[in-house]
Image (cartoon, rainbow, N blue to C red):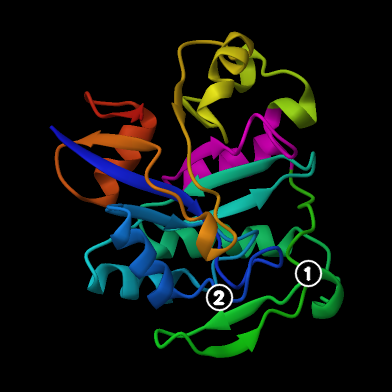
Amino acid sequence: MLEVPADLHLHSCLSPCADITMLPREMTRRLASRGIQVASLTDHNTACNVGVFQRVFQQNGVLLVPGIEATTAEEVHLLCYFETLHALWAFSRTLFASYPRIANDPERFGYQLICNERDEYVGQFPFLLSMASSLSLDELRGLAERLGGVVVPSHLDRHYGLLYQLGMVTPEMQFITYEITHRINIEKILPNLPGHPQIISNSDAHNLDSMSPPRFVLEIEELSVHEVLTALRHERGRKVRLL
């Protein structure tokens, strides 16, 4: 079994709250310097930069898991991972259709920049991406899972986390894997979670300096997106382990 360092929560220059220096070549260099072999670009409510990042990452030996950070109607953030770009785009199109068309004001809310493989800006996303979807947590989770995806609630121990927003996680809404921001909070978080879930922790990087060394490893048989999703589902002996 391989133990593969991962960071599955990264934002690019497309997320309005991220720095405009979050570009594929520079981010690849940072990941390599930290020994991270698997990463996911999870911009807020859009996948427009994922294809570019996938090509640059894989050219430099980093496996990219197609992903997105979706905001539910309850304003809960969900990390949604998919095996293929095709499945990610199918999810992204439905998500995009479900949130309000409010024109972005870059000076007020932040730039939402689309880039190419040469770290050049080639466009701006016109509608504000920090808005909540009109789809509920259950609806977005169901959509992702029907497309073969895995859903991991983001940063349980801070704002926009499932526990923060809803106050509890009932047995009916339990997940296999959850994300926390700080490992130190795990003893406070676990008693509030039904079942026996897995925990991951990522950098949630919005600027280059916040791209941290790996906080967890994937225990998988081979380096593939399918194996990563299997570990997040905690199936066939594949799993995750906090460092």
Q: CA distance from mark 2 to mark 1?
A: 19 Å
Q: Nearer the viewer, residue 5 or 34?
A: 34
Q: Position of residue 49 (x, y in %)?
A: 51, 73
Observer-side mark, 2 or 1, equals 2
Q: Residues within 10 Å of mark 2 (few under 14, many from 20)?
A: some
The quadrant of the image that shows the C terminus is: top left
Tag 2–tag 1 contact (CB < 8 Å): no
Which label sits on residue 154? none
**Looking at the image, residue 217 lies above or below residue 27:** above
- Say left or right for 38 vs 11: left
Q: Nearer the viewer, residue 189 or 78?
A: 189
Q: Residues within 10 Å of mark 1 (few under 14, many from 20)?
A: many
Question: What amino acid type should be assigned to the residue bearing mark 1?
Answer: Leu
- Count the marks: how many? 2
Which range of residues does the magenta coloring cover? 136-162
Query: Sequence-wise, which precedes: disc 2 or disc 1?
Result: 2
- Say left or right for 73 vs 60: right
Q: In what element is the residue under mark 1? A: loop
Q: Position of residue 43 (x, y in %)?
A: 58, 61
Q: Which residue is mark 2?
A: 21
* Residue drawn at the location 27% of the way across and 53% of the way down: 37
**Looking at the image, residue 138 lies above or below residue 214:** above
**Looking at the image, residue 93 lies above or below residue 158:** below
Question: What amino acid type should be assigned to the residue bearing mark 2?
Answer: Thr
Q: Which residue is mark 1?
A: 128
- Say left or right for 54 vs 128: left
Using the rendered image of the protein, determine whether residue 63 is visible from the camera's viewpoint: no
Membership of 143 in magenta stretch: yes
Q: Position of residue 142 (x, y in %)?
A: 58, 39
* Residue drawn at the location 42% of the way across and 68% of the way down: 27
